Image (spheres, coloured by chain):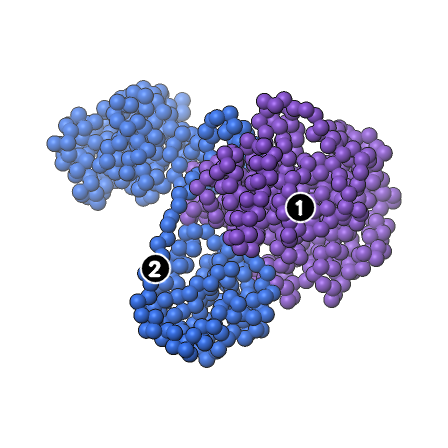
Amino acid sequence: MAKKIRIVHYINQFFAGIGGEEKGSSPLGHCVGPKGPGLGIVQAIGDEAEIVQTIWCGDNLINQEEDRILAEIEALLAEAKPDLVIAGPAFGAGRYGLACGMVARLCTQKLGIPAVIGLYWENPAVEIYRKDAYIYPCAETVAGMRKDLPGFARLALKLGKNGRLGPATEDGYLPRGFRYNEFVEKNAAIRSIEMLGRRLRGEDPMTEVPLRGFEKVPPAAPIVDLKAATIAIVTGGGMVPRGNPDKLKQAFADAFGIYSIAGLSELPAGEFKGIHGGFDSTWVDEDPDRVVPLDVLRAMEKEGRFKKLHNEYFSLCGIGTNVAMSKKLGADIAEELKRRQVSAAIYTST
Amino acid sequence: MKLERGYFQARDCVFGKVTNYDDGILCLARESLAKELLDLDENKHIKTLEIEIVKPGEDARIVHVLDTLQPGVKVEGEGDFMPGQLCDPVIVGSGRTHLLENVAVMECAELPWAGKSALLYARDAIVDMTGPAAGYSPFSETFNLVLRMTMTEGASDVEYDEAVRHAGVRFARRIGSLLKDLKPDWTETFDFDLVVDPALPKIAYVTQCQNQGTYSNTYLYGKEVSNLVPAVYSPTEIMDGCLVSGNYVWPCFKIPSFIQANLPVVMELAREHGKTVNFVGVIFDRGHNNSHFEKMRVANLAAAQVRRLGAQGVVISWEGGGNAATDAMLTLQTCERWGIKAVAFTFEFGGPDGTEGVLLVDDVPEAKYLVSGGSIEKPTTIPRVKRVAGGDVLRLRKETGGEAEPADIERTLDNITAFYCGGNQSGIGRLAGVGY
């Protein structure tokens, strides 16, 4: 007979039978075998796996003394040598949910032990720990225990057996935020037509690209005294000195360049080149001021419309760069501008 | 319109003394076919041309891929297959057309890079016939007749573009002509004259092409479509090749002529027409419009066509990157605001593990139903291969020098932009982004 999968189960003081809120500071405890909800889980799992140990702790204590308690749990796990750690279900309970997440993170990130926790999808711990563990979506309250345990146990057993799980929609856990390319059964055209067909029949099919949400970028506060302002030019239009000295990419930017315009009243054609991979650069090569408007800004500087034009411009190719990288590059550019005591920037895009 | 398509499934492609198609074997007289093409005045900017055959499953890589075309011939009905290409721009889509289903003509050449615009130059496009990248391109599953060309010096971009396309069109037509009097392996009839059950849901398809200048254009009845006004076409016109591609800029984001004539949404809806759906028409328009004003204008005009057809639902897709996504999203938004249910499919971002930032470049709140064509931000390692066709080298990263490197070696590419059709924008690929 195959070796049984060894599971350690983490629960809180309430499910260990010690007491509710008032016992939230009760110390870490453990016993051999299942306890509380573990008894139901064992039934659902059958004989392919066993809960070898149950660990519990007061919710307040583990949240207040995370490092110390986790170190003690680590020591217990080192002895129990589980193949898998499960925690909860914690349903909608905030502190218990966080405790389950902490234990799961310890297991997956530090000890390399796979972990499954059970949480209600709106439990605050979901957002914090979704990347660290597989989260089985439970009911909001303990009233759902009987209904949730078989699914929770099935997910745990599958993870214990395979070491990994399939796609979130197939195996029924909350998506962890990871997305990978796969070759699926039907091509994208057929799947689109099927999705449309379901909509036309009044159904509400699940989108394959999760809803993105919209972020509003608040406009910066206006400059109080333009005459005292130092202004810099930042462009996403990919204008660089001839030869592209920083080897900036023509798309999928991962860096930006900072180039001197000291002593120049305009960007001379031939000395600067457009490398942006998303538009025909013929016209900006002919006159680079079309994307880095140095000529106009120098004239305004001369007129005293503002104090000074910063003697460098910042450049990258704004195309194909994902939002996370765009935010990082934007923050880095802003940091550099602040360090140079620039008070405002003009961003030209294409 | 009513079109019958007769399909031929080749069992093999070989070189031989005479050019013919017999019992599923396509035989090519290699030297004389190449000479036929080179002798044509229209091909005077092609210096050398060699025909190569690359087969499915071969340990081979094809490089410098430009357009790919389907060998086909009109047997009955007006016009030629690929109307307006070296023939009159006559409305097609009726009668009978014969097609080689699994043989593709592939134009391959190193078009000049020096002095080219940062967008408008032919990037190196890769088709791997086996290995981890094979699934990115439908042409890993076809017999590929590679026209390996070198070009004369000093011609203009327009002349180079025309030269490679004309060679491809001529050759595809030459091979297609072999099928004219033969009996197809199977046929399909698409009858849009039928009166369909009024209870069937009316569905339209909006396909938005790329057209940003020479080397990124799409040809409609023989002319590029810079100033295109969105209009309705019969699915059978599309099947008869009224759209031909001259788009060589971003390899993952192009829809070659072969696929344009077999757009999977068109084919699928046409097959279901009169059975489960009423396929009311194809709206063809152009993305990458220059300003928000122009994008709004085209989106509204395209959506107006969808509404005029009385469609209750619409599938929307586009060719090209983030710029084009904006035009398509505005089209989707307009349709949804008018109560027309829209589903679009798209490539996505997200970085190597899918966690980096939002997944799309542009978006509208109405885009609640999207199918994933896979992420383009996945590093891909391609192995050493035995054989390279189309050329010997790979030219990557023009903006940092673009030195030619050997094409046969193992290498890892940061993302999938160099893989021909890897962005899955026609929906032909089974690639999808899957959440974990």
- What residue is shown at x 39% (from left), y 66% (from top)? A345
- Looking at the picture, tell me which residue is in the foreground, B186 or A35: B186
B41 w.r.t. A193: above or below: below
Image height check: is B128 above or below A297? above
Read off the residue under disc 2.
Answer: A220
Query: According to the image, label 1 marks what residue?
Result: B256
Q: Is residue B132 visible?
A: no
The answer to whether residue B370 is above or below residue B382 is above
Q: Closer to the camera, B132 or B214?
A: B214
Quadrant of the rendering where the N terminus of chain B is positioned: top right
Residue, far left = A22
Camera-nearest residue between B60 and B417: B417
Q: Which color has been applied to chain A in this rendered view?
A: blue
**Left or right: B26 with respect to A172?**
right
- Eye-nearest disc, 2 or 1: 2
Measuring from the top left, give residue A298's x and y in whole percent.
45, 75
Chain on which label 2 sits: A
- Find the residue positioned furthest to the right: B18
Please tell me the colour of chain B: purple
Q: Quadrant of residue A85?
A: top left
Chain letter of mark 1 equals: B
The number of numbered discs placed on residues in the rendered structure image is 2
The quadrant where residue A88 appears: top left
Q: Quadrant of residue A159?
A: top left
Which residue is at a point 34% across and 34% down the rendered structure image?
A: A135
| One can see residue B75 in this view | yes
Side of A84 relative to B213 (left or right) = left
Q: Position of residue B249 (x, y in %)?
A: 62, 54
Residue B197 position, x and y percent, is: 63, 22
SS under mark 2 = loop
Circle 1 SS class: loop
Amino acid on which disc 2 is placed: Ala
